[in-house]
C-alpha cells in the first residue's frame, strides 16, 4: 500500500533534496545509503546461506538490497532510475564480478551442474531486448518474464539434482544439525537486511538525485550507473574475493549469474506491475484529499528508454553471450579476459554518460 502515498512522498523527497543540496549533502546521502546497502547485503547472505556453500541462497541475499533500491525508486515514481539499477547491477555482475574472479582465480574449476546454469542469462537478456522494440513494458511482458523465470528456476533445480545430487536449488552442502537451531538468528538477520536495504535505498536514490541537482551536467541516471550500480555489486566483489581464496570462486560467479536472472525474471516484472498502481494515483484538486485513483487500464505502459535499450541491454546481451562458451568449457576466463571485462564496465559508464547527455 506504499503506492497510495507516492505523490506525497515524492514531493517531500524533492523538497528535502533541494534543501540538502544547498549544504552539499547529496554525496553524503549516497555514501550513507551505500554503507547501509553493503551491510544489508552481507546480513542477507548470512541469514540465507548460514555460512554454507550455496550459490542460490547467496544470490538471493545479494539481490535483496538491489530489489529494495529499484522498488523504492519506483515508489518515488522514478521508473527510469529503477530500470537503470536493474541493468547496471546485472552488467556489473557479468563484468566487474566475473572479471575480478577471473583475475583472482583464473584456474578455478566449476562443477558442471552449476556451469550449465550460466547460459540461461542469454535468453533472459535477449527476451528483454526483443521487448525493447516496442519501447514500453506492459502486463503481458511482465507475465512472459515471470514465466521464463519459473522455467529457469525449474531447470536450475533439475540440473543441480542430476549433476551433483543437490537437494535444493544452488545448495551443495546441507546445514549441520548444530546450525539448524540458529534459525532465529537467521530470521533476525533477514529482518535487519530488509530494514537496512529500504533505508539505504531511500538514501541512495535521494543522494543520486541530489548529485544530479547539484551538478546539472551529470544526470541522476548517470550517477546511478557510475556510482550506485558498482556500490550495489561491491558486496559480491568482497565476498567473491574471500571465496576465491578458499578455491570456491565458482560459487561467486554462479551467484552473480543468479542475481542477473533474478533481476530480469523477477525484479523487472515486479517493477512493471508496480508501475500501474503508482501512476494510477494522481493529484486532483476537485477530488477527496486532492487525490484521484484512475483505473489501471487508463495508465499508459511503462516506457523503456532508448538509451537503456540500445546501450545497457545490448551490453548485457554481449556479456551473457560470453558465458555460453565458458559454460561449455570451450573458453577459460583468465586474467586477460578478467581485466578486459573490468575495463568494459568503465567504457559502459562513459557511453552511458554520453548517451544521457544526448537524450
Image (cartoon, rainbow, N blue to C red):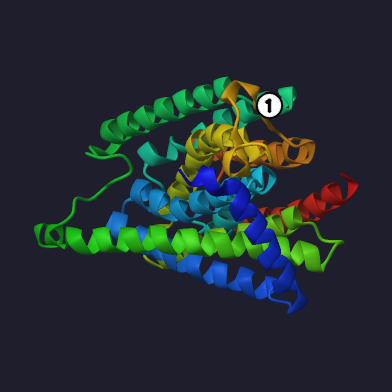
Q: Classify mark 1: helix, strand or loop.
A: loop
Q: Tell me if residue 257 comes above or below residue 342 in the rendering.
A: above
Looking at the image, residue 61 sits to the left or right of residue 24; the answer is left
Image coordinates of residue 311 in percent, x first then y, are: 76, 41
Which quadrant of the figure has residue 167?
top left
Question: Residue, x 59% and y 56% (percent of image)?
Answer: 99
Question: Residue, x 78% and y 40% (percent of image)?
Answer: 307
Q: Work out whether residue 235 can be spotted.
A: no
Residue extending farthest to the right is 358
Image coordinates of residue 174 in percent, x first then y, are: 19, 50
User: What is the tally of numbered marks visible in this picture?
Assistant: 1
Q: Tell me if residue 328 comes above or below residue 40 in the rendering.
A: above
Which residue has dot 1 on it? 300
Image quadrant in which the N terminus is located: top left
Question: Residue, x 55% and y 51% (percent of image)?
Answer: 72
Residue extending farthest to the bottom is 23
Image quadrant in which the C terminus is located: top right
Mark 1 Cα shell of 10 Å, populated few (<14), some (14-19), many (≥20): some
Question: Residue, x 74% and y 57% (percent of image)?
Answer: 220
Q: Work out whether residue 124 can be spotted.
A: yes
Relative depth, front residue between 251 and 354: 354
Image coordinates of residue 296 in percent, x first then y, are: 58, 25
Looking at the image, residue 308 sits to the left or right of residue 194; the answer is right
Image coordinates of residue 133 in percent, x first then y, are: 73, 23
Amino acid at each position: 500500500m506504499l503506492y497510495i502515498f507516492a505523490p506525497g512522498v515524492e514531493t517531500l523527497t524533492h523538497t528535502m533534496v533541494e534543501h540538502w543540496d544547498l549544504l552539499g549533502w547529496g554525496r553524503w546521502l549516497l555514501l550513507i545509503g551505500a554503507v547501509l546497502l553493503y551491510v544489508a547485503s552481507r546480513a542477507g547472505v548470512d541469514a540465507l546461506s548460514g555460512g554454507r556453500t550455496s550459490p542460490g541462497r547467496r544470490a538471493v541475499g545479494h539481490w535483496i538490497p538491489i530489489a529494495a533500491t529499484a522498488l523504492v525508486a519506483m515508489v518515488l515514481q522514478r521508473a527510469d532510475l529503477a530500470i537503470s539499477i536493474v541493468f547496471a547491477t546485472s552488467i556489473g555482475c557479468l563484468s566487474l564480478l566475473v572479471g575480478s574472479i577471473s583475475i583472482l582465480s583464473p584456474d578455478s574449476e566449476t562443477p558442471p551442474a552449476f556451469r550449465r546454469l550460466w547460459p540461461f542469462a542469454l535468453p533472459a537478456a535477449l527476451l528483454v531486448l526483443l521487448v525493447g522494440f516496442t519501447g514500453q513494458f506492459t502486463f503481458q511482458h511482465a507475465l512472459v518474464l515471470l514465466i521464463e523465470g519459473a522455467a529457469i528456476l525449474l531447470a536450475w533445480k533439475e540440473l543441480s539434482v542430476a549433476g551433483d545430487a543437490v537437494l535444493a536449488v544452488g545448495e551443495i552442502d546441507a546445514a549441520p544439525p548444530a546450525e539448524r537451531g540458529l534459525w532465529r538468528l537467521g530470521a533476525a538477520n533477514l529482518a535487519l537486511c530488509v530494514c537496512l536495504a529500504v533505508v539505504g535505498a531511500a538514501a541512495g536514490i535521494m543522494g543520486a538525485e541530489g548529485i544530479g541537482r547539484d551538478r546539472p551536467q551529470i544526470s541522476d541516471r548517470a550517477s546511478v550507473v557510475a556510482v550506485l550500480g558498482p556500490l550495489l555489486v561491491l558486496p559480491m566483489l568482497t565476498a567473491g574475493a574471500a571465496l576465491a581464496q578458499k578455491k570456491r570462486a565458482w560459487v561467486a560467479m554462479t551467484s552473480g549469474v543468479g542475481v542477473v536472472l533474478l533481476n530480469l525474471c523477477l525484479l523487472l516484472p515486479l517493477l512493471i506491475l508496480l508501475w500501474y498502481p503508482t501512476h494510477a494515483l494522481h493529484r486532483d484538486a476537485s477530488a477527496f484529499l486532492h487525490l484521484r485513483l484512475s483505473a489501471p487500464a487508463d495508465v499508459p505502459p511503462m516506457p523503456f528508454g532508448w538509451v537503456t535499450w540500445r546501450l545497457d541491454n545490448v551490453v548485457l546481451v554481449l556479456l551473457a553471450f560470453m558465458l555460453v562458451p565458458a559454460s561449455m568449457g570451450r573458453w577459460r576466463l583468465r586474467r586477460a579476459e578478467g581485466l578486459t571485462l573490468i575495463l568494459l564496465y568503465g567504457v559502459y559508464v562513459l557511453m552511458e554518460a554520453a548517451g544521457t547527455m544526448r537524450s
